[in-house]
Amino acid sequence: MSFKRQNNYRGLVTSVIFFLFCFCVNSATKLPNFILLNLDDVGWGDFGVHGNPARETPRIDQMVSEGMDMTSFYTAAPLCSPSRAAMLSGRLPIRNGLYSDNAFGRNAYTPQDIVGGIASSEILLQELLRKGGYHTKLIGKWHLGHRAPYHPLKRGFNEWYGAPNVHFQYDGTTAPNIPVYKDQNMIGRFYEGIAINLTTNTTNLIAGISEYTQHLGEEALEYISRRGRTGKPFFLYWNPDSTHAPSYASARFRGRSQRGTAYGDALIEVDDIVGKMLDLLVNHKLENDTLVVLTSDNGAALVSKREAGTNAPFLCGKQTTFEGGFRTPAFFWWPNKIPAGNASSQVGTQMDLFATFLDLAGLPMPRDRVYDSISLKPALMNGDLDLEKVVFFYRGNGLFAVRKGRFKMHLWTWRTPQEELKRGIDYCPNIHMDGIVSATQVNHTAEPILFDVDNDPEERYPIRPGNSPTIYETAVGYLKKVVEKHQQDLVPGKPALNYCDPAVENWAPPGCEDLDDCLPIPASKVVICDWPH
């Protein structure tokens, strides 16, 4: 038998086994629904349940009181696109390719001039769930590539309402405004048919049909109701971006926050919509069949100053590998399945949602690649902890830190690049720690910086080799072995975020002809992307 025919035969056998496995599981048990609420630049300290004095998230706080708070939970990257790619692929960005190696330790993402996106070779969560009998919908920001090969409907989603990029404003001439899609085609653009008023920090949808964040909520409520009536399992991935600078809120929420900021208003609005989703699940008697998870793509963006959340009590914010950049809220709600009112010390990452959802759906993990994902089911259902869980803190292509158990070891530290500081941008405002929170990359590989983040989550009191030699040598010794093994086994994915080109921007998205909104496409000019982060 030829090599090609052997591969085809093996592929056929694998598909048949997957189908039979799913058929048997689906026939034996009722599959749970999954709702993944991924907020944007919302900090760990923004919630009343985490001590925020404003206490402006009553519905999310209630969600936590009825479910579980996983307090040592991390993203896989300290900014949007690589974080989202890791959550949906179950793999670090250095493996799945959502990074750049144009310069060491620089964060990269998917602005609208990026050429690349999530690789077609990556197997995404929604693709596996869909094969296993789930209906899938993305609402809100995608941010894993806006060009045709990366369209969400080509990557496992049955439906989409939202935008491919963040809602930055452009002049429409040197760069187009970002489109909003309904499934395959655009239905308008931010700041044009879909207005965001940066003076009043409010927003409305086309012809006043609905305010944008409200419409994201309405889409979610309609989807839950519609799919709930079918009795078949669904996966809803909800990604509002109103808390990302420039923050905005719908008119009736403007001025509501005690913080006096559009960010606070936006978070109140998101909290209100989350509450409506939970109420709908209860009213439709879906709560016992639905796992709801709320998290954020990274820590709060302190660079936004007034228009930002808080990462209290953690150090620094978005873009950094300190706790404030990586540690995120992780709230799990599933009445009569997850014990109410519990806090778990299980160390976890958003990548673990990949294995967790598959485990709960009775679906197998693919066996042809390395995953950075473990199932959290034992911790959620029984309180059993996996003490071997390791968290790697990458900044771009650079491994900056690692955590296992109580201890976190920094191999590199970096506050904010000099060129950003000159522009008034600081990811660690008003924080000074010599040799640790620094404006230049500092290599600590010879003598790593060690913190006990169980007892010092603020990362303010490093364990020095001279002060606590036994603790330091033991912890650094085994963490170095963890790093050595990781780097020996690592096969980096091809970096997808190296090249930019103005010709690939959102000039003429699908559906622009129907709206008479196709803009002239400029000549291609591929350049190496410059990442200032």
Image: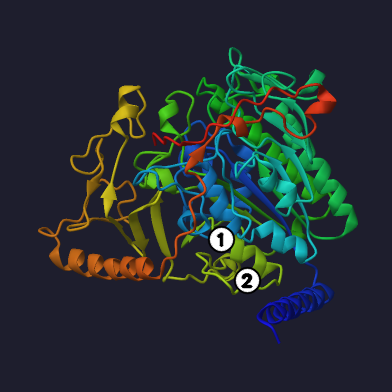
Determine the residue located farthest toward the left in the rendered image: 466
Q: Position of residue 200 (x, y in %)?
A: 61, 14
**201 up-or-down from 212: above or below:** above
Secondary structure state at the residue bearing disc 1: loop
Looking at the image, do the residues carrying marks 1 and 2 touch, with CB atoms under 8 Å apart?
Answer: yes
Front-lying residue, 55 or 437: 437
Q: Residue at x 68, y 35 (%)?
A: 163
Mark 2, Cα crowd under 10 Å, few <14 / some 14-19 / many 20+, is some
Residue to which mark 2 is pinned: 365
Secondary structure state at the residue bearing disc 2: loop
What amino acid does circle 2 point to? Met
Residue to which mark 1 is pinned: 90
**440 up-or-down from 400: above or below:** above
Q: Residue at x 68, y 21 (%)?
A: 203
User: Number of labelled discs?
Assistant: 2
Q: Position of residue 489 (x, y in %)?
A: 40, 70
* Residue 469 sits in quarter: bottom left
Q: Is residue 334 visible?
A: no
Quarter the C terminus occupies:
top left
Q: Residue at x 51, y 20 (%)?
A: 260
